[in-house]
Image (spheres, helix red, strand yellow):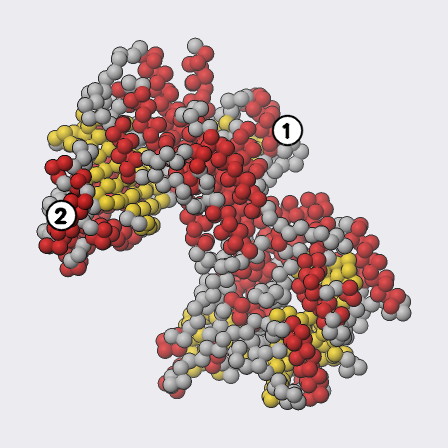
């Protein structure tokens, strides 16, 4: 970069340059002015487009760190923005220099093709059956029937356990449904319009999409296939109507690392007359607020998820619940955890009530180790006709165990067999009907966490006075401290501050979108088997449920420490407990959306064209969009420089700055960089109209340079040694281009190539009222001292620049700093800093071996800059 | 007080709320704004009112944005057109750029960004006109 700029400036600023060429007619001059104006306008558009590309690439790089969630809309929008702006740059380059760089278009098309192929990647379904009976389903069919139903198929057909009769409406049917009347296209458009504010506009986007789905007609082919499957079920049921459980079985749901727990809708006890309404409800639930938030936070691509729907004969359960075949909170614990309640298992998974817990040893006798019978005030039961109702338990039933010991052991036996079959811990939903028959409704992989208890020698007694509540159920382990925010109704979601402790009365799946934004979750109700507990564990957020009366204990805004493993909540911040905090999991890493971004970024961000002097620096060798922008930026600057020279156009030839005396600063006016037309060799500072150049100069000239720093012996030796290796560093034979500096300016734009002493720097700035387009780029390289000292200075400058808001990166011995999007005053102040640093970091590399001097100069430069900024 | 830019901008979008809000914001910023809610309604305005810049939504019922663009260019090849879209399709964007749209912005649009694009499109149009004039002399 620096080498080629030197070469370029050699070409453009010949030392004995006589600005005046052959005298031109005024019409010719006018035509040249117009041509130059047109070129400069294209150059400005090109720079603005370049800035947009860099901005979008920086967004991508930030996203690639995996700390923040992002969606496919984000990836697509950035790709489109980059493509459009790279294309814009090519078009502008063609305006600047017609016919010279046509090969850029070929490179563009080749790169674009590769990106397109990655963005439209979608699994192709080969099996087009719309409906499959559950009796024909096995676990290798997850692409067609979704993970949940594929697993259940094996439980029914391979393990021969009791699973309700039913059928699955497949992914192929989903494809047919979404393709009808351009439904999917409209959904994609709604997501796109929501843009990067997708998570903030969740309610609106979700409601618009769900409305579209609910008002769509079910295609006839699906309708007929479902009627056929139901008729067969009815025949097998002696011609009796069957009420159904209509359950989501989406792709990715119930996978090993992502449960989508409670994110989608399942409708229970549905009569066939209402069936298609609920089928659409389940499909629409793919776009529920919580499902969109979950997909966003876990990096799932919407297009990868087809909503298959399982339709099972309804089990009118007297008891039901969830089995964890191992302890999800502690991977050393192999006991079987059976959560149970009266009525349908929905009460357990929804998390709005307490349930019984039976812990069973994995010994031959399946011994019941522990029984925790809790007060079950409510149960969910089937309505006689259709639907379900939450009703109070009566006649003391609430305090009675919902399972007999024999039933507990039978369930444990089922659990062991299912786990053995899948060879991994399972989370199993079950129900028992009035005849005592066990039905398995769902089985999915269970994630186990590592237990992470505080050090045994930590005396918890010392925090007793701060204890606010204890005895809660550890739903997700860990410790966190923050201010409390109570959420009682849906509208409270809108006001939830990021990083607060979420406090709720019931652990409902509705609150799931807040979990990823919360420091911890406290609920008065619910157990560790509910959906919300599952989500908290997935996101690594500590959760404590069953904390009775929690909502009344604290006010919004009060600070608490939640220690989920201890089942305790403390008032204020308990620092010793916080040391036991878990690192936040980076959930985006490796996710489908993340991988898509990583793949496309290879064709966008990587830079291969490094040396403009190299023969390989050609349009044909541009392998990425970054290469194209790099190439165009380099060549456009060169073309702008050569315009005046090529046309013997004195107005557009460089002038020497006269600032008290003639200086080694040369300036090329691109457009309106001078206050008026300058004839002759020199331009005075008062004739400069370029805002960025004036800002830079103000910083450069504000504080006199004290001269070279006093060197220690090692610093001097370092330079002597380097001088023997590199003759360009020996003052007597140094390049004639040393200590010469070149500006190219317009009113709002300046680029500078400067060499002061032995370091080289370039600066480019756009500063106007258009804050959004303002930017400032600074590159710095070199020095006379050895590599370590040069690097010392580069890091010294980087530290200062970062302090003042620059984004600075050091690659090899290059410093690359950038700042953008600020208003004129701010940009002006940062240019002053660059002007100051350009002068005052001269030869500082020599003292970089001496930490005392480094500290001294850091303090001095910081003080000077602060005083400069206060002027 | 916003500077008066004076020149005519035609805003074509079928979304009433977006069109009216954007027209209001551009008017406040000194543009002389004409509006149309579909491609069909835009063409007579291009013919009779001679706008300098057209801001055109791509996804419209009836005459599609890309089709409208082609018709506008037939009426006045020098008018600059900025496309707006809620669709991220890169292919679409590039195709339109190749056909000669001045720029391509994705919804939701930042009003300042739109304003700059309109100003840039206007400058480009004036330069093109001047160059064409000089060439014909």
Residue positioned 28% across, 37% down in the render: A3
Q: Nearer the viewer, residue A88 or A194?
A: A88
- How packed mark 2 is, by other alpha carbons closer than 10 Å (few <14, some 14-19, many 20 or more), is some
**Chain letter of disc 1 in the image:** B
Image spot of residue A92 (x, y percent): 43, 30
Residue positioned 34% across, 20% down in the render: A33
Q: For residue A658, what is the image quadrant?
A: top left
Outermost residue to the front:
A725
Q: For residue A573, what is the image quadrant?
A: bottom left
Is residue A228 toward the left or the right of residue B132 in the image? right
Which of the labelled discs sits on residue A720, or is there none?
2
Is residue A311 toward the left or the right of residue A513 in the image? right
Residue positioned 60% across, 89% down in the render: A369
Q: How many marks?
A: 2
Image spot of residue B26 (x, y percent): 47, 35
Image spot of residue A71 (x, y percent): 53, 53
Q: Is residue B29 above or below residue A352?
A: above
Image spot of residue A824 (x, y percent): 32, 41
Residue, disc 1 = B40
In this rendering, does residue A790 appear at all?
yes
Which of the labelled discs sits on residue A677, or is there none?
none
Residue positioned 43% across, 28% down in the render: A101
């Amino acid at each position: 970069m620096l080498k080629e700029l030197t070469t370029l400036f050699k070409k453009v600023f010949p030392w004995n340059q006589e600005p005046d060429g052959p005298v031109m007619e005024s019409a010719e001059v006018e035509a040249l002015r117009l041509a130059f104006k047109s070129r400069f306008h294209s150059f400005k558009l090109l720079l603005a487009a370049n800035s947009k590309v860099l901005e979008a690439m920086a967004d991508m790089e930030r996203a690639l760190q995996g700390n923040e969630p992002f969606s496919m809309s984000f990836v697509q929008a950035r790709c489109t923005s980059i493509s459009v702006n790279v294309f814009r740059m090519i078009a502008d380059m063609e305006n600047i220099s017609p016919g010279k760089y046509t090969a850029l278009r070929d490179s563009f098309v080749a790169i674009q093709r590769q990106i397109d192929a990655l963005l439209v990647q979608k699994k192709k379904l080969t099996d087009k059956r719309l409906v499959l009976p559950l009796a024909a389903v096995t676990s290798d069919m997850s692409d067609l029937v979704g993970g949940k139903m594929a697993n259940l198929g094996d439980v029914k057909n391979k393990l021969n356990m009791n699973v309700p009769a039913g059928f699955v409406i497949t992914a192929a049917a989903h494809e047919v449904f979404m393709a009808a009347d351009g439904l999917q296209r409209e959904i994609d458009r709604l997501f796109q319009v929501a843009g990067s504010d997708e998570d903030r506009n969740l309610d609106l986007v979700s409601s618009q999409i769900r409305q579209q789905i609910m008002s769509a007609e079910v295609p006839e082919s699906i309708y007929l296939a479902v009627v056929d499957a139901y008729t067969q079920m009815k025949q097998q049921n002696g011609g009796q109507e069957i009420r159904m459980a209509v359950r989501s079985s989406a792709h990715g749901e119930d996978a090993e690392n992502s449960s989508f727990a409670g994110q989608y809708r399942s409708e229970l006890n549905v009569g066939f007359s209402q069936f298609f309404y609920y089928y659409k409800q389940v499909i629409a639930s793919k776009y529920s607020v919580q499902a969109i938030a979950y997909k966003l936070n876990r990096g799932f691509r919407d297009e990868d998820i087809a909503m298959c729907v399982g339709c099972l004969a309804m089990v009118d359960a007297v008891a039901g619940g969830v089995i964890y075949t191992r302890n999800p909170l502690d991977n050393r614990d192999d006991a079987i955890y059976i959560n149970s309640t009266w009525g349908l298992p929905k009460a357990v998974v929804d998390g709005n009530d307490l349930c019984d817990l039976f812990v069973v040893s994995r010994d031959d006798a399946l011994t019941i180790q522990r029984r925790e019978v809790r007060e079950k005030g409510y149960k969910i039961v089937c309505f006689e006709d259709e639907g379900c109702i939450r009703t109070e338990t009566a006649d003391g039933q609430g305090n009675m165990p919902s399972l007999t010991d024999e039933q507990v052991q039978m369930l444990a036996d089922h659990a062991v067999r299912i786990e053995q079959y899948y060879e991994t811990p399972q989370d199993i939903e079950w129900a028992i009907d009035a005849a005592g028959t066990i039905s398995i409704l769902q089985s999915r992989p269970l994630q186990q966490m590592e237990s992470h208890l505080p050090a045994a020698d930590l005396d918890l007694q010392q925090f007793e006075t701060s204890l606010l509540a204890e005895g809660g159920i550890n739903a997700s382990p860990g410790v966190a401290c923050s201010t409390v925010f109570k959420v009682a109704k849906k509208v409270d979601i809108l006001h939830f501050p990021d990083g607060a402790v979420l406090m709720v009365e019931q652990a409902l799946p509705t609150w799931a979108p807040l979990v990823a934004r919360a420091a911890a979750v406290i609920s008065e109700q619910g157990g560790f088997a509910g959906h919300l507990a599952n989500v908290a564990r997935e996101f690594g957020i500590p959760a404590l449920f069953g904390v009775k009366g929690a909502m009344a204990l604290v006010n919004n805004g009060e600070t608490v420490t939640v220690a989920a493993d201890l089942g305790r909540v403390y008032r204020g911040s308990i620092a010793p407990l916080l040391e036991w905090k878990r690192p936040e999991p980076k959930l985006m890493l490796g996710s489908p959306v993340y991988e898509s971004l990583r793949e496309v970024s290879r064709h966008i961000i990587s830079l291969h064209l490094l040396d403009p002097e190299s023969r390989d620096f050609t349009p044909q060798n541009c392998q990425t969009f970054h290469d194209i922008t790099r190439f165009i930026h380099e060549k456009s600057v060169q073309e702008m420089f050569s315009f005046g020279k090529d046309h013997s156009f004195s107005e557009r030839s460089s002038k020497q700055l006269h600032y008290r005396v003639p200086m080694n600063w040369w300036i090329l006016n691109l457009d309106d960089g001078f206050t008026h037309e300058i004839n002759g060799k020199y331009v005075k500072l008062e004739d400069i109209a370029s805002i960025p150049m004036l800002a830079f100069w103000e910083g450069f000239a504000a504080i006199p340079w004290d001269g070279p720093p006093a060197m220690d012996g090692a610093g001097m030796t370092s330079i002597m040694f380097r001088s023997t290796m590199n003759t360009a560093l020996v003052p007597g034979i140094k390049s004639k281009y040393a200590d010469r500096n070149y500006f190219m300016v317009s009113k709002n734009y300046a680029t500078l190539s400067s060499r002061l002493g032995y370091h080289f720097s370039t600066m480019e700035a756009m500063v106007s009222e258009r804050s959004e387009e303002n930017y400032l780029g600074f590159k710095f390289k070199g020095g006379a001292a050895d590599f370590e000292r040069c690097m010392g200075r580069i890091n010294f400058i980087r530290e200062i620049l970062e302090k003042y808001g620059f984004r600075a990166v050091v690659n090899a011995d290059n410093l690359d700093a950038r700042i953008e999007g600020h208003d004129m005053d701010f940009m002006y102040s940062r240019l002053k800093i660059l002007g100051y640093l350009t002068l005052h970091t001269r030869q500082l590399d020599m003292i970089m071996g001496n930490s005392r001097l480094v500290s001294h100069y850091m303090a001095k430069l910081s003080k000077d800059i602060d005083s400069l900024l206060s002027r | 007080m916003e500077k008066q830019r004076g020149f005519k901008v035609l805003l074509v979008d079928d979304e009433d709320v977006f069109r009216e809000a954007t027209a209001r914001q551009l008017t406040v910023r000194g543009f002389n704004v004409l509006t149309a809610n579909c491609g069909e309604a835009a063409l007579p305005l291009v013919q009779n009112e001679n706008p300098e810049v057209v801001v055109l939504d791509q996804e419209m019922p009836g005459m599609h944005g890309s089709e409208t663009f082609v018709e506008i260019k037939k009426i006045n090849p020098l008018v600059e057109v900025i496309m707006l879209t809620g669709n991220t399709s890169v292919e679409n964007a590039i195709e339109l750029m190749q056909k000669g749209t001045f720029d391509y912005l994705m919804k939701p649009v930042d009003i300042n960004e739109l304003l700059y694009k309109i100003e840039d499109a206007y400058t480009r149009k004036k330069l093109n006109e001047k160059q064409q004039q000089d060439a014909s002399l």
